[in-house]
Image: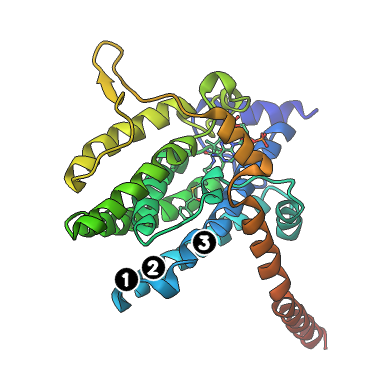
Amino acid sequence: EDVAGQAYFDRVIAEDSRIEPRDWMPAAYRKTLTRQVSQHAHSEIIGMQPEANWITRAPSLKRKAILMAKVQDEAGHGLYLYSAAETLGTPRDVLNQQLLDGKAKYSSIFNYPARTWADMGAIGWLVDGAAIANQVPLCRASYGPYGRAMVRICKEESFHQRQGFEILLELSNGTPAQKQMAQDAVNRFYAPALMMFGPPDDDSPNSKQSMAWNIKRFSNDELRQRFVGMIAEQVKVLGLTLPDPELHYDEAAGRWIHKDLDWQEFKDVISGKGPCNAQRMARRREAHENGTWVREAARAYAQKQAAKRAA
Ligand code: FAQ
């Protein structure tokens, strides 16, 4: 036990200041951040799949270019986040192996299928929207590299949300069949998007400690109800509805009330039994294997450069 280190750490947290990679930190702080940041990185990478599925079927060249840029942004987010996670001491290949072995989680939302073009709208609006609501407070996370990565990521997520909203708006103002397709996508993504914020507070084992360490700034339920309040207004502009007749603002309680979510479904999805878990993991393993030659070439190049420097 490092008494001086602990005292320094406690002071930094009390002052709401930042912990940097070389600072002393409790082993449990390092562990929980490694878990959260690597899970977040895996989510960005696995999260490319539902949308990549629609790149070849985008309805116009313009839509295709936008969607391709969006999916590439997610790859970039994964890279910033793996870099941030590595500063905590676990190498990226180890983190990646945890994903491939099914030991590390990634966001539940990416285990749902993207069935129609309107799903690109619903994913941008609801999934990126939930990601922003969750990630804006993370820009102030006490761990420096994570907070700084979040600042860049949130800027890009804002563009992603707008492009999703705009896809839905156009469909909603289109033919009756297009409007129905948009409504159907919103109906399917609403509850899974609300589950992105994690289990209810009384069933969230990490929340209390992560809030005490200034990693999380708000609880899962606080962010979920803040998000639902935002989309309750935005859906009116879209001319669509949310599949939640109970949704309302409770003046007395000062909070949004939404329907009960199916937490058994959530548990099933995060334990590998969601509609697309097997497909997502198979695709990820295949992509990893297809990338072997790139890793080998990069290693050979690094060795050559090192030999040149030594000579
Ligand atoms: N899915 O005690 P808590 C994106 C796990 S956005 C899967 O409440 P915590 C952008 C949790 O890890 C999506 N697992 O945990 C994009 C923990 O696992 P353990 C990624 C979940 O950490 C858009 C256990 O359950 N965003 O990628 C989920 O305090 C479009 C107990 O839960 C982030 O990762 C879930 N929904 O709070 C990309 C944000 N919820 O300990 C492409 C950063 C919980 O059993 C296309 N992460 N778990 O191993 C966070 O803010 C937090 O980690 C929470 C969970 C809020 C997700």
SS class, disc 1: helix
SS class, disc 2: helix
Asked whether, in this view, residue 269 is left or right of residue 187, the answer is: right
Q: Which residue is mark 2?
A: 67
Residue 148's label in the rendered image is: none
Asked whether, in this view, residue 168 is left or right of residue 277, the answer is: left
* Total numbered circles: 3
Label 3: few (<14), some or many (≥20) within 10 Å?
A: many
Q: Tell me the kind of residue under disc 1.
A: Arg
- Residue 4 x, y percent position in the rendering: 72, 28
Q: Is residue 23 visible?
A: no
Q: Tell me the kind of residue under disc 2.
A: Leu
State ligand 1's quadrant: top right
Q: Tell me the kind of residue under disc 3.
A: Met
Q: Nearer the viewer, residue 65 or 39?
A: 65
Q: Is residue 265 above or below residue 74?
A: above
Q: Is residue 3 visible?
A: yes
- The residue sitting at 16% across, 56% down in the picture is 173
Kindly indicate whether the residue at mark 1 contacts the one at mark 2 (C-beta within 8 angstroms): yes
Mark 1, ligand 1, within 8 Å: the answer is no
